[in-house]
Amino acid sequence: MRVIADLHIHSKYSRATSTRMDIDEITRFAPVKGLNLVGTGDFTHPQWFKELKEKLVEEQNTGLYKPVKAARSPLKFMVTGEVGTIFTFEGKTKKIHHLILTPSLETAAQINDRLAHYGALEVDGRPALDMNAAALVEEIMEVSAGNVVIPAHIWTPWFSLFGAFSGFDRIEDCYQDMTRHIFAVETGLSSDPAMNWRLSALDRFTLVSNSDSHSSWPWRIGREANVFELKEMSYAAVVDAIRSKDPQRFPFTVETYPDYGKYHWTGHRNCNVSLPPEEAIKFGGICPVCRRKLTKGVEQRVDELADRPTGFKPAGVPGFVRLLPLSEVIQVLLGATYPGVQKVWRIYNRLISRFGDEFTVLTEASFSDMAETVDPKIAEAIIRVRTENIRVIPGYDGVYGRIEIFEEPADEEKQKTDEKLKIVQNKQAEENTKRSRQKRLADFL
Protein backbone atom coordinates (compact mmCIF):
# COMPACT_ATOMS: atom_id res chain seq x y z
CA MET A 1 0.00 0.00 0.00
CA ARG A 2 1.10 3.57 -0.62
CA VAL A 3 1.88 5.58 2.50
CA ILE A 4 2.45 9.34 2.18
CA ALA A 5 3.91 10.57 5.44
CA ASP A 6 4.76 13.93 6.97
CA LEU A 7 6.51 12.98 10.19
CA HIS A 8 7.62 16.40 11.43
CA ILE A 9 4.90 18.88 12.40
CA HIS A 10 4.12 20.95 15.49
CA SER A 11 1.17 21.46 17.81
CA LYS A 12 -0.48 24.61 19.11
CA TYR A 13 1.90 24.40 22.07
CA SER A 14 4.97 25.28 19.98
CA ARG A 15 6.04 28.88 19.54
CA ALA A 16 4.82 30.65 16.39
CA THR A 17 2.28 27.89 15.70
CA SER A 18 -1.41 28.24 14.87
CA THR A 19 -3.71 28.02 17.88
CA ARG A 20 -5.88 25.69 15.77
CA MET A 21 -3.10 23.16 15.29
CA ASP A 22 -4.80 20.31 17.12
CA ILE A 23 -5.82 16.72 16.38
CA ASP A 24 -9.18 17.71 14.91
CA GLU A 25 -7.74 20.23 12.46
CA ILE A 26 -4.86 17.96 11.44
CA THR A 27 -7.34 15.12 10.87
CA ARG A 28 -9.45 17.46 8.74
CA PHE A 29 -6.75 18.80 6.42
CA ALA A 30 -4.03 16.12 6.17
CA PRO A 31 -6.17 13.78 3.99
CA VAL A 32 -7.13 16.75 1.78
CA LYS A 33 -3.43 17.19 1.15
CA GLY A 34 -3.13 13.47 0.36
CA LEU A 35 -1.39 12.38 3.56
CA ASN A 36 -2.38 9.18 5.31
CA LEU A 37 0.33 9.27 7.99
CA VAL A 38 1.47 12.25 10.06
CA GLY A 39 3.61 12.76 13.11
CA THR A 40 1.94 14.02 16.27
CA GLY A 41 4.74 16.47 16.92
CA ASP A 42 5.54 17.84 20.38
CA PHE A 43 4.95 14.69 22.45
CA THR A 44 7.34 16.14 25.06
CA HIS A 45 4.88 18.92 25.98
CA PRO A 46 2.76 17.86 28.99
CA GLN A 47 -0.51 19.43 27.79
CA TRP A 48 -0.17 18.12 24.24
CA PHE A 49 0.78 14.69 25.55
CA LYS A 50 -2.40 14.72 27.64
CA GLU A 51 -4.44 15.57 24.53
CA LEU A 52 -2.75 12.81 22.55
CA LYS A 53 -3.78 10.26 25.16
CA GLU A 54 -7.36 11.56 25.14
CA LYS A 55 -7.85 12.03 21.39
CA LEU A 56 -5.90 9.13 19.88
CA VAL A 57 -6.34 5.39 20.18
CA GLU A 58 -3.70 2.87 19.21
CA GLU A 59 -4.37 0.71 16.21
CA GLN A 60 -3.58 -2.75 17.46
CA ASN A 61 -0.09 -4.09 16.76
CA THR A 62 0.91 -1.24 14.43
CA GLY A 63 2.58 1.31 16.71
CA LEU A 64 0.35 3.93 15.07
CA TYR A 65 -2.73 5.77 16.31
CA LYS A 66 -6.06 6.88 14.88
CA PRO A 67 -8.25 9.80 15.97
CA VAL A 68 -11.03 8.84 18.38
CA LYS A 69 -13.53 11.28 16.84
CA ALA A 70 -12.84 10.16 13.28
CA ALA A 71 -12.22 6.44 13.50
CA ARG A 72 -13.03 5.99 9.78
CA SER A 73 -10.51 8.59 8.68
CA PRO A 74 -7.69 7.16 6.51
CA LEU A 75 -5.25 9.20 8.58
CA LYS A 76 -2.94 7.57 11.11
CA PHE A 77 -0.60 9.25 13.60
CA MET A 78 2.95 8.33 14.57
CA VAL A 79 4.21 9.61 17.92
CA THR A 80 6.92 12.18 17.11
CA GLY A 81 8.53 15.30 18.51
CA GLU A 82 11.33 17.77 17.97
CA VAL A 83 13.76 18.89 20.64
CA GLY A 84 16.71 21.26 20.68
CA THR A 85 20.00 20.68 22.44
CA ILE A 86 22.30 23.53 23.48
CA PHE A 87 25.88 22.67 24.40
CA THR A 88 29.49 23.70 24.00
CA PHE A 89 31.91 21.95 21.66
CA GLU A 90 35.54 23.05 21.38
CA GLY A 91 34.70 26.37 22.98
CA LYS A 92 31.75 27.17 20.69
CA THR A 93 28.03 27.07 21.48
CA LYS A 94 26.10 24.54 19.41
CA LYS A 95 22.32 24.58 18.95
CA ILE A 96 21.00 21.48 17.22
CA HIS A 97 17.43 20.32 16.58
CA HIS A 98 16.48 16.65 16.46
CA LEU A 99 13.37 14.79 15.30
CA ILE A 100 12.35 11.86 17.52
CA LEU A 101 10.15 8.93 16.44
CA THR A 102 8.85 6.52 19.06
CA PRO A 103 6.60 3.44 18.76
CA SER A 104 4.05 4.26 21.47
CA LEU A 105 2.75 6.81 23.92
CA GLU A 106 4.17 4.57 26.66
CA THR A 107 7.72 4.88 25.35
CA ALA A 108 7.08 8.61 24.79
CA ALA A 109 6.21 8.97 28.48
CA GLN A 110 9.49 7.30 29.44
CA ILE A 111 11.41 9.66 27.16
CA ASN A 112 9.67 12.61 28.76
CA ASP A 113 10.64 11.42 32.24
CA ARG A 114 14.30 11.39 31.21
CA LEU A 115 14.35 14.65 29.26
CA ALA A 116 12.60 16.56 32.05
CA HIS A 117 15.94 16.49 33.89
CA TYR A 118 17.53 18.64 31.16
CA GLY A 119 14.95 21.37 30.60
CA ALA A 120 11.44 22.68 31.20
CA LEU A 121 9.27 20.61 28.84
CA GLU A 122 6.17 22.69 29.51
CA VAL A 123 7.67 25.93 28.16
CA ASP A 124 7.53 25.03 24.48
CA GLY A 125 6.40 22.16 22.28
CA ARG A 126 9.96 22.09 20.97
CA PRO A 127 11.92 22.29 24.23
CA ALA A 128 15.50 23.51 24.57
CA LEU A 129 17.54 20.97 26.51
CA ASP A 130 20.80 21.58 28.35
CA MET A 131 22.60 18.49 27.06
CA ASN A 132 24.77 17.53 24.13
CA ALA A 133 23.53 15.66 21.08
CA ALA A 134 25.27 12.41 21.97
CA ALA A 135 23.72 12.39 25.46
CA LEU A 136 20.29 12.96 23.93
CA VAL A 137 20.62 9.95 21.64
CA GLU A 138 21.90 7.81 24.49
CA GLU A 139 18.91 8.71 26.67
CA ILE A 140 16.45 8.05 23.83
CA MET A 141 17.93 4.70 22.83
CA GLU A 142 18.11 3.47 26.42
CA VAL A 143 14.32 3.78 26.59
CA SER A 144 13.78 1.58 23.54
CA ALA A 145 15.81 0.24 20.64
CA GLY A 146 12.75 1.02 18.53
CA ASN A 147 13.19 4.76 18.99
CA VAL A 148 14.68 6.85 16.19
CA VAL A 149 16.60 10.13 16.27
CA ILE A 150 16.91 12.09 13.02
CA PRO A 151 18.89 15.34 12.74
CA ALA A 152 16.26 17.92 11.78
CA HIS A 153 16.43 20.32 8.80
CA ILE A 154 20.18 19.80 8.70
CA TRP A 155 21.14 22.92 6.68
CA THR A 156 19.09 25.68 8.32
CA PRO A 157 21.52 28.46 9.38
CA TRP A 158 20.36 28.29 12.99
CA PHE A 159 19.65 25.21 15.10
CA SER A 160 20.84 22.44 12.77
CA LEU A 161 23.55 19.85 12.26
CA PHE A 162 25.36 21.71 9.45
CA GLY A 163 23.98 25.17 10.23
CA ALA A 164 26.27 28.04 9.30
CA PHE A 165 25.98 29.75 12.70
CA SER A 166 26.02 26.98 15.30
CA GLY A 167 26.44 23.68 13.50
CA PHE A 168 29.21 21.23 12.64
CA ASP A 169 31.14 20.24 9.53
CA ARG A 170 30.96 16.52 10.39
CA ILE A 171 28.05 14.52 11.77
CA GLU A 172 30.48 12.48 13.89
CA ASP A 173 31.58 15.62 15.75
CA CYS A 174 27.97 16.30 16.70
CA TYR A 175 26.82 12.84 17.76
CA GLN A 176 30.20 11.35 18.74
CA ASP A 177 29.98 7.59 19.42
CA MET A 178 26.17 7.78 19.23
CA THR A 179 26.42 8.38 15.48
CA ARG A 180 26.00 4.64 15.10
CA HIS A 181 22.32 5.09 16.01
CA ILE A 182 21.73 7.76 13.34
CA PHE A 183 20.62 6.35 9.97
CA ALA A 184 18.63 9.22 8.44
CA VAL A 185 18.81 13.01 8.15
CA GLU A 186 16.12 15.54 7.25
CA THR A 187 16.86 17.77 4.25
CA GLY A 188 14.75 20.80 5.23
CA LEU A 189 12.87 23.16 2.93
CA SER A 190 15.93 24.98 1.54
CA SER A 191 17.70 21.86 0.28
CA ASP A 192 16.71 18.73 -1.63
CA PRO A 193 18.33 15.31 -2.15
CA ALA A 194 20.28 16.51 -5.21
CA MET A 195 22.08 19.06 -3.05
CA ASN A 196 22.77 16.52 -0.30
CA TRP A 197 24.08 13.93 -2.77
CA ARG A 198 27.07 16.24 -3.29
CA LEU A 199 28.41 15.13 0.11
CA SER A 200 29.86 11.62 0.06
CA ALA A 201 29.79 11.70 3.89
CA LEU A 202 25.99 11.49 3.71
CA ASP A 203 25.87 8.39 1.50
CA ARG A 204 25.21 6.07 4.43
CA PHE A 205 22.23 8.11 5.65
CA THR A 206 18.71 8.05 4.25
CA LEU A 207 17.37 11.46 3.23
CA VAL A 208 13.89 12.17 4.58
CA SER A 209 11.70 15.21 3.99
CA ASN A 210 8.97 16.68 6.18
CA SER A 211 7.10 19.95 6.38
CA ASP A 212 8.03 21.10 9.91
CA SER A 213 4.56 22.62 9.66
CA HIS A 214 3.21 25.10 12.20
CA SER A 215 -0.23 25.11 10.59
CA SER A 216 -2.76 22.54 9.38
CA TRP A 217 -3.53 24.52 6.22
CA PRO A 218 -2.72 22.45 3.11
CA TRP A 219 -0.15 24.96 1.86
CA ARG A 220 1.90 24.18 4.97
CA ILE A 221 1.28 20.61 6.17
CA GLY A 222 2.67 18.03 3.76
CA ARG A 223 4.51 20.58 1.61
CA GLU A 224 7.36 18.07 1.98
CA ALA A 225 6.69 14.38 2.61
CA ASN A 226 7.92 10.80 2.26
CA VAL A 227 6.31 8.26 -0.05
CA PHE A 228 6.47 4.58 0.94
CA GLU A 229 5.22 1.39 -0.72
CA LEU A 230 4.59 -1.05 2.14
CA LYS A 231 2.84 -4.35 2.74
CA GLU A 232 1.29 -2.82 5.85
CA MET A 233 1.14 0.57 7.50
CA SER A 234 2.96 0.25 10.79
CA TYR A 235 5.63 2.03 12.78
CA ALA A 236 8.08 -0.82 12.26
CA ALA A 237 7.47 -0.98 8.50
CA VAL A 238 8.02 2.76 8.05
CA VAL A 239 11.17 2.81 10.16
CA ASP A 240 12.57 -0.25 8.41
CA ALA A 241 11.91 1.28 4.99
CA ILE A 242 13.79 4.43 6.02
CA ARG A 243 16.64 2.46 7.56
CA SER A 244 17.05 0.26 4.48
CA LYS A 245 17.03 3.07 1.87
CA ASP A 246 15.31 0.52 -0.35
CA PRO A 247 13.82 2.35 -3.37
CA GLN A 248 11.21 -0.40 -3.69
CA ARG A 249 9.77 0.42 -0.27
CA PHE A 250 10.83 4.07 -0.12
CA PRO A 251 10.67 5.22 -3.74
CA PHE A 252 10.82 8.99 -3.32
CA THR A 253 10.33 12.11 -1.26
CA VAL A 254 8.20 15.13 -2.10
CA GLU A 255 10.26 18.32 -2.04
CA THR A 256 9.43 21.96 -2.44
CA TYR A 257 11.74 23.67 -4.90
CA PRO A 258 14.75 24.35 -2.62
CA ASP A 259 14.94 27.92 -3.95
CA TYR A 260 11.52 28.43 -2.40
CA GLY A 261 12.88 27.82 1.11
CA LYS A 262 13.51 30.75 3.42
CA TYR A 263 17.26 30.25 3.62
CA HIS A 264 18.34 29.07 0.17
CA TRP A 265 20.50 32.05 -0.81
CA THR A 266 22.74 34.20 1.34
CA GLY A 267 21.30 37.60 2.20
CA HIS A 268 20.08 40.26 4.56
CA ARG A 269 16.34 40.88 4.53
CA ASN A 270 16.51 44.25 6.32
CA CYS A 271 18.49 45.61 3.39
CA ASN A 272 16.72 43.58 0.68
CA VAL A 273 20.04 41.98 -0.26
CA SER A 274 19.91 38.45 -1.76
CA LEU A 275 23.02 36.86 -3.23
CA PRO A 276 24.05 33.54 -4.82
CA PRO A 277 27.10 31.89 -3.25
CA GLU A 278 29.67 33.30 -5.66
CA GLU A 279 28.48 36.88 -5.12
CA ALA A 280 28.26 36.46 -1.34
CA ILE A 281 31.86 35.26 -1.32
CA LYS A 282 32.94 38.33 -3.31
CA PHE A 283 31.49 40.52 -0.56
CA GLY A 284 33.24 38.48 2.13
CA GLY A 285 29.94 37.52 3.75
CA ILE A 286 29.28 41.17 4.66
CA CYS A 287 26.14 43.04 3.65
CA PRO A 288 27.18 45.70 1.10
CA VAL A 289 24.46 48.03 2.37
CA CYS A 290 24.73 48.03 6.18
CA ARG A 291 28.14 46.31 6.53
CA ARG A 292 26.74 43.68 8.91
CA LYS A 293 27.17 39.94 8.58
CA LEU A 294 24.99 38.26 5.95
CA THR A 295 22.90 35.21 6.81
CA LYS A 296 24.71 32.45 4.96
CA GLY A 297 22.33 30.53 2.73
CA VAL A 298 21.98 26.77 2.44
CA GLU A 299 23.33 26.67 -1.12
CA GLN A 300 26.54 28.40 -0.05
CA ARG A 301 26.89 26.15 3.01
CA VAL A 302 26.45 23.03 0.86
CA ASP A 303 29.12 24.33 -1.51
CA GLU A 304 31.52 24.65 1.42
CA LEU A 305 31.16 21.03 2.52
CA ALA A 306 30.52 19.31 -0.83
CA ASP A 307 33.13 17.01 -2.35
CA ARG A 308 31.14 16.20 -5.51
CA PRO A 309 29.91 18.27 -8.44
CA THR A 310 26.32 19.36 -8.94
CA GLY A 311 24.34 16.61 -10.67
CA PHE A 312 25.98 13.62 -8.96
CA LYS A 313 23.55 10.89 -7.86
CA PRO A 314 24.51 7.82 -5.79
CA ALA A 315 23.21 4.47 -7.00
CA GLY A 316 20.25 2.72 -5.38
CA VAL A 317 18.80 5.59 -3.34
CA PRO A 318 15.23 6.91 -3.14
CA GLY A 319 14.43 9.58 -5.70
CA PHE A 320 12.42 12.78 -5.32
CA VAL A 321 9.89 15.01 -7.03
CA ARG A 322 9.73 18.79 -6.77
CA LEU A 323 6.31 20.30 -6.17
CA LEU A 324 4.79 23.48 -4.80
CA PRO A 325 1.64 23.82 -2.67
CA LEU A 326 -1.42 23.91 -4.93
CA SER A 327 -2.93 26.84 -3.04
CA GLU A 328 0.14 28.94 -3.71
CA VAL A 329 0.19 28.05 -7.40
CA ILE A 330 -3.42 29.25 -7.65
CA GLN A 331 -2.57 32.32 -5.58
CA VAL A 332 0.16 33.33 -8.04
CA LEU A 333 -2.16 32.91 -11.02
CA LEU A 334 -4.91 34.99 -9.40
CA GLY A 335 -2.54 37.63 -8.05
CA ALA A 336 -3.96 37.06 -4.55
CA THR A 337 -2.14 38.32 -1.49
CA TYR A 338 -2.65 35.14 0.55
CA PRO A 339 -3.37 31.49 -0.33
CA GLY A 340 -6.27 31.36 2.13
CA VAL A 341 -8.52 33.93 0.46
CA GLN A 342 -11.92 32.74 -0.76
CA LYS A 343 -11.22 33.05 -4.48
CA VAL A 344 -8.25 30.69 -4.10
CA TRP A 345 -10.25 28.26 -1.92
CA ARG A 346 -13.06 28.08 -4.47
CA ILE A 347 -10.72 26.89 -7.22
CA TYR A 348 -8.77 24.66 -4.84
CA ASN A 349 -11.94 22.93 -3.62
CA ARG A 350 -13.15 22.36 -7.18
CA LEU A 351 -9.96 20.49 -7.98
CA ILE A 352 -10.06 18.50 -4.72
CA SER A 353 -13.70 17.55 -5.31
CA ARG A 354 -12.82 16.27 -8.79
CA PHE A 355 -9.55 14.45 -8.06
CA GLY A 356 -9.70 13.56 -4.36
CA ASP A 357 -6.64 15.21 -2.84
CA GLU A 358 -3.90 17.71 -3.57
CA PHE A 359 -1.08 15.27 -4.34
CA THR A 360 -3.26 13.59 -6.97
CA VAL A 361 -3.91 16.97 -8.59
CA LEU A 362 -0.24 17.92 -8.54
CA THR A 363 1.18 14.61 -9.77
CA GLU A 364 -1.46 12.71 -11.74
CA ALA A 365 -4.39 14.79 -13.02
CA SER A 366 -4.25 15.35 -16.78
CA PHE A 367 -4.36 18.79 -18.34
CA SER A 368 -7.59 18.00 -20.19
CA ASP A 369 -9.36 16.78 -17.05
CA MET A 370 -8.21 19.80 -15.02
CA ALA A 371 -9.16 22.20 -17.82
CA GLU A 372 -12.72 20.84 -17.64
CA THR A 373 -12.82 21.80 -13.97
CA VAL A 374 -10.92 25.11 -13.74
CA ASP A 375 -9.45 27.79 -15.98
CA PRO A 376 -7.09 26.09 -18.48
CA LYS A 377 -4.34 28.52 -17.47
CA ILE A 378 -4.44 27.14 -13.95
CA ALA A 379 -4.28 23.61 -15.38
CA GLU A 380 -1.26 24.63 -17.44
CA ALA A 381 0.40 26.16 -14.37
CA ILE A 382 0.02 22.88 -12.47
CA ILE A 383 1.58 20.98 -15.37
CA ARG A 384 4.44 23.49 -15.44
CA VAL A 385 5.10 22.94 -11.73
CA ARG A 386 4.99 19.16 -12.25
CA THR A 387 7.48 19.32 -15.14
CA GLU A 388 9.69 21.94 -13.44
CA ASN A 389 8.96 24.44 -16.17
CA ILE A 390 8.81 27.44 -13.82
CA ARG A 391 11.23 29.78 -12.08
CA VAL A 392 11.61 30.46 -8.39
CA ILE A 393 13.38 33.59 -7.21
CA PRO A 394 15.39 32.19 -4.27
CA GLY A 395 14.43 32.80 -0.67
CA TYR A 396 16.97 34.28 1.74
CA ASP A 397 17.38 35.27 5.40
CA GLY A 398 13.89 34.18 6.46
CA VAL A 399 12.11 35.36 3.30
CA TYR A 400 10.33 32.70 1.21
CA GLY A 401 11.22 32.44 -2.47
CA ARG A 402 8.92 33.90 -5.12
CA ILE A 403 7.18 31.71 -7.69
CA GLU A 404 7.15 32.82 -11.33
CA ILE A 405 5.09 30.66 -13.68
CA PHE A 406 4.14 32.75 -16.72
CA GLU A 407 6.83 35.39 -16.76
CA GLU A 408 9.29 36.99 -19.14
CA PRO A 409 11.98 34.86 -20.86
CA ALA A 410 14.99 33.75 -18.90
CA ASP A 411 17.35 36.21 -20.65
CA GLU A 412 15.20 39.13 -19.42
CA GLU A 413 15.18 37.66 -15.93
CA LYS A 414 18.96 37.32 -16.06
CA GLN A 415 19.17 40.99 -17.02
CA LYS A 416 17.07 41.88 -13.98
CA THR A 417 19.34 39.80 -11.71
CA ASP A 418 22.44 41.41 -13.20
CA GLU A 419 20.95 44.85 -12.67
CA LYS A 420 20.17 44.02 -9.05
CA LEU A 421 23.72 42.81 -8.45
CA LYS A 422 25.05 45.96 -10.09
CA ILE A 423 23.02 48.11 -7.69
CA VAL A 424 24.41 46.16 -4.74
CA GLN A 425 27.96 46.49 -6.07
CA ASN A 426 27.48 50.24 -6.59
CA LYS A 427 26.29 50.59 -3.01
CA GLN A 428 29.41 48.80 -1.82
CA ALA A 429 31.60 51.06 -3.96
CA GLU A 430 29.91 54.13 -2.49
CA GLU A 431 30.52 52.83 1.02
CA ASN A 432 34.19 52.16 0.22
CA THR A 433 34.57 55.67 -1.23
CA LYS A 434 32.90 57.20 1.82
CA ARG A 435 35.18 55.34 4.22
CA SER A 436 38.22 56.31 2.14
CA ARG A 437 37.27 59.99 2.30
CA GLN A 438 36.70 59.78 6.03
CA LYS A 439 40.11 58.16 6.48
CA ARG A 440 41.85 60.85 4.39
CA LEU A 441 40.09 63.57 6.37
CA ALA A 442 41.14 61.95 9.64
CA ASP A 443 44.73 61.72 8.43
CA PHE A 444 44.67 65.36 7.36
CA LEU A 445 43.31 66.53 10.71
Image: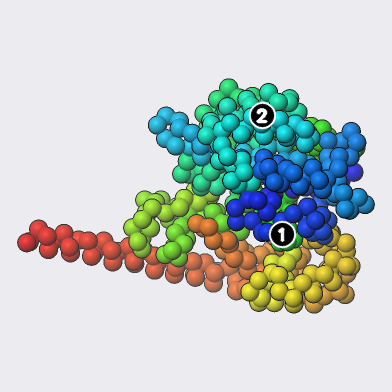
Give the left or right position of residue 445, taking residue 230 as reference: left
Query: Looking at the picture, which amino acid does disc 1 mark?
Result: Arg
Q: Earlier in the sequence, mark 1 or mark 2?
A: 1
Q: Residue at x 72, y 34 (%)?
A: 109
Categorize mark 1 by other alpha carbons within 10 Å: few (<14), some (14-19), many (20+): some
Furthest residue toward left = 445
Picture coordinates of residue 81, whole percent (x, y): 68, 41
Residue 140 - label: 2
Residue at image x 38%, y 53%?
A: 293
From the viewer's side, name the closer residue of 2 and 423: 2
Disc 1 on helix, strand or loop? loop
Foreground: disc 1 or disc 2: 1
What amino acid is labelled 2 in the image? Ile
Using the numbered discs, state the Cα–Cα distance from disc 1 to disc 2 in whole angstroms.
30 Å
Where is the N terminus found, in terms of image quarters? top right
Residue 267 is situated, as x and y percent measured from the top left of the image, at 46, 57
Q: Nearer the viewer, residue 307 or 171?
A: 171
Question: Residue lying furthest right in this view?
Answer: 72
Q: From the viewer's perspective, is residue 142 above or below residue 407?
A: above
Q: Which image quadrant: the C terminus?
A: bottom left
Q: Can residue 65 be seen?
A: yes
Near-viewer residue (212 or 431): 212
Quick check: 48 left or right of 91?
right
